[in-house]
Image (cartoon, rainbow, N blue to C red):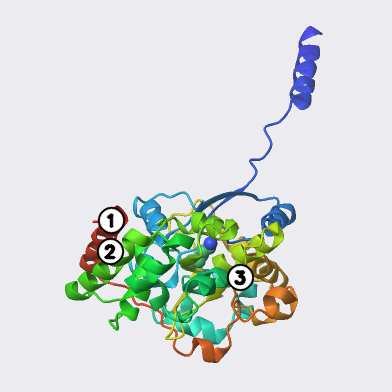
Amino acid sequence: MRRPILALMASLLAALAPQPAAAQPVLNVYNWTDYIDPHVVQRFQQETGIRIRYDVYDSLETLEGKLSAGRSGYDVIVPTSEPTFARLVRAGALRPLDRARIPNWRNLDPALLARVAAIDPGNAHGAIYLWGTVGLGLRLDRVRAIAPELDTGSLDLLLKPENAAKLAGCGLAVMDSATDVLPSVLRWLGRSPDSADAADLRAAEAALLAIRPHLRAIPGSGALLDMLATGEVCVALAYSGDVIQAAARAREAGRGVELAYVPPRAGPHLFFDMLAVPADAPNPEAAHAFIDFLLRPEVIAAVSSHVRYPNAVPASRPLIVPAVRDDPSVHPAPAALAEAFVPGTPPAAAERLRNRLWSRFRAGR
Ligand code: N2P
């Protein structure tokens, strides 16, 4: 008699005890700072029940450092097409995307995809997330008050030492990234933006060292966005959307900081940031679901509206908030991009020279 009762009690207790819930799936995202609308993250979690663990970086150097160690633990990363994404494709470090699980792939602009297909044949490993240019973040009122004669449409404004000396008092900065700064400097010098030539790189170093004493800071791109927004710097070499985001924040703060993004008229450095999945991603299924979600017109429109970078989904355009959609500094006219250049991927030896040069520039010697 006792036995069956005990057995019954045991099974009742087992039924009442809290069951270990089926582990909630987790998606590990590694993206640039200030590069998503947080509501989009929330919405994905609500719709799918997948929890997003979200980390950020603010330079390609940091992203590559994290990935080169292997086993990053990330499911979705956002490398720039060249050089980082190109290198990862070549190294076999990315998982080919399963298009059957990304029905919204059809929303991507084929003309833009064609621009990255040279480094990723058939666009097998990456969808374009957002794109932009590198140029000047300017407090135009300050610059004009100090030096009305200077041309703000040229990198001369920052890179000619006599101009830098003149403007130093209002705060000059260059974002901390050899990869994303050297191409513009080399191009300004009339050299190839992805030059591997030691003489070209020496010239770029000399140019940077010549303005180094006039720089207030060489911050990471995320910190630079903040410094622009508070008005701490009045001339900076930065990513387009970061400056435009900073301008919006400054307007909201209402403290009289007015910012403009001005790409060099001679042709800006153009970049495409890719959604990609590391070969050893722990949850590739969730990675595909997230990429597909981001490529919905209304979702990527919310991202562009928030971060002020253009995307590659034409059907999202009417859904972007008008202030961003109709801002020519966010969505440049095709003519403004005619001279833009996408730098290639320097070989490893040149990469080492570039990194050493950059350390000397940072240290100021
Ligand atoms: C986001 C910067 C991303 C643009 N803050 C650089 N590819």
Q: Could you classify mark 1 by the number of other residues whose Cα lies within 10 Å: few (under 14), some (14-19), or many (20 or more)?
A: few
Residue 8 in the image: x percent, y percent? 79, 18
**Mark 1 or 2, nearer chain start:** 2
Residue 207 in the image: x percent, y percent? 28, 70
Q: Residue furthest top?
A: 2
Q: Which mark is residue 209?
A: 2
Q: Is residue 139 above or below residue 15?
A: below
Q: Residue at x 46, y 82 (%)?
A: 151
Q: Secondary structure at mark 1?
A: loop
> What is the quadrant of the N terminus in the image?
top right
Q: Is residue 215 visible?
A: yes
Separation of residues labelled 1 and 2 (CA atoms): 6 Å
Q: Residue at x 62, y 82 (%)?
A: 328
Mark 3 belongs to which amino acid?
A: Ile
Residue 157 in the image: x percent, y percent? 42, 75
Q: Could you classify mark 3 by the number of other residues whose Cα lies within 10 Å: few (under 14), some (14-19), or many (20 or more)?
A: some
Q: Are marks 1 and 2 in contact (CB under 8 Å)?
A: yes
Separation of residues labelled 3 and 1 (CA atoms): 47 Å
* Residue in the foreground of this view, choosing between 170 and 118: 170
Residue 3 in the image: x percent, y percent? 76, 10
Answer with left or right where residue 146 lies relative to residue 346: right
Mark 1 belongs to which amino acid?
A: Gly
Q: Which mark is residue 102?
A: 3
Mark 2 belongs to which amino acid?
A: Leu
> What is the quadrant of the C terminus in the image?
bottom left
Q: Which mark is residue 364?
A: 1
Q: Is residue 229 above or below residue 273?
A: above
- Residue 59 sits in which quadrant? bottom left
| Nearer the camera: disc 2 or disc 3 | 2
- Residue 43 sits in which quadrant? bottom right
